Amino acid sequence: MEWNGAAADFPGDRCVHELVAEQAALLPAKIALVFGAERVSYGELEARAEGFARRLASRGVGPGQIVGVYLERGPALVVALLAVLKAGAGYTVLDTAFPVERLAAMTRQAGVSLVVTADELGWLPGLEFVSVDGVEAGVPVVSQASPGDVACVMFTSGSTGVPKGVVASHRSVVGTLTSQDFVHFGAGEVWLQCAPVSWDAFALELFGALLHGATCVLQPGQVPEPAVIAGLIAEHSITTVHVSASLLNFLVDEYPRAFVGVRQVMTGGEAASVAHLAALLGAYPRLRLVNGYSPVESMIFTACHTVRAEDLGRAAIPVGRPIANKRVYVLDGDLAPVPVGVVGELYMAGVGLADGYVGQSGLTALRFVANPFEPGERCYRTGDLVRWRGDGVLDFLGRADDQVKIRGFR
């Protein structure tokens, strides 16, 4: 379909940690992470991750495993994630703010047997633990991971039942965050990482920076704090920000000067407020403001729309067009495309599509179905209702069921 994402070359033969290592080789002295008074260069980040990867490998960590990472937001968390990937395994972030029962259920569902943490967790019986401070001397780890292997398992909120672990490959992350133009990616950007570490937006904010040699400023604490965000933007001259629609509304209302110096803002997770976006662009007319959309099953963003003045007279902001190498279909109940302007259910395909739900083959088969237009491929049935506009832009109209979203949670 001509309105689908353009084909673009991207490093689909590379893993996430390999691309970060390439940036470390090119820019060893460049600051990769900022956290409070701590500064971590790309060279230091690579060395620490490599050293910890050796320790993980000595504990038997390798391809086919999912390692839990239970650490508060900070450089140690990033080191641990990269080390897990270097060892050839995938990670799942266990948010320290989550209830014990939920964390235990997540580790069971993902088949986690080893957890990286600062302290042993007695409430997770039967698991092994390893401290992120430990390193092993020796030769560099030769990763056995391939681009199609699992990079991470991200859990849904569980508000419609038991949380589902969505399995994403290296290629899904790399394909979504490289060779794209929905925002500018480059070494000259300074990104803010404030999204909860269990969300797919965490990968956007962290690897959107690290895959391109940019600086990533980590907000202290586990949940976004508007006053802290405003302070960090000013203190570190942050240029690239992603916040949920409700958080953006609050920042516009209560911290209108927070976006001074910011070049690009991404928002999503729920319907954008036309009034708040109009106020933001009125105050910062040169700001690149992007409304993005995707369920976690299709990695971070599948469609994006750069908000323009003409959008601000509409009742709702569109979710836009598919980004590079991603495809969408608006179908009826018989899986036939509906005409322009007619409401249908949205199906997603292409780069970024998850492998499915960990440990839930039946649910995977129900939601990840055969692509009726591309033999041998799958697509994800979103349950969202949309329609094509005449200009090839998608309008989001709600759910096909009774779900609603409040502050990004279904």
Image (spheres, rainbow, N blue to C red):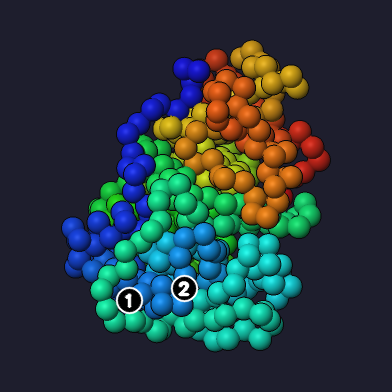
| Residue annotated with mark 2 | 60
How far from the left and from the top, in percent, is residue 82?
39, 65
Q: Residues within 10 Å of mark 2 (few under 14, many from 20)?
A: few
139 lies above or below 409 = below
Residue under the point 72% across and 38% down: 366
| Residue annotated with mark 1 | 51
Front residue (pair 14, 216)? 14
Q: Earlier in the sequence, mark 2 or mark 1?
A: 1
Of marks 2 and 1, the one in the foreground:
2
Q: Is residue 377 left or right of residue 230?
A: right
The secondary element bearing badge 2 is classed as loop
Residue under the point 56% across and 45% down: 354
Is residue 225 at all visible to an observer of this figure?
no
Is residue 4 at all visible to an observer of this figure?
yes
Residue type pointed to by label 1: Gly
Front residue (pair 33, 407)? 33
Residue type pointed to by label 2: Gly
Distance from disc 2 to disc 1, alpha carbons, whole Å, reads: 15 Å
384 lies above or below 262 = above
How far from the left and from the top, in percent, is residue 263?
35, 48
**Quadrant of the rendered structure where residue 134 is?**
bottom left
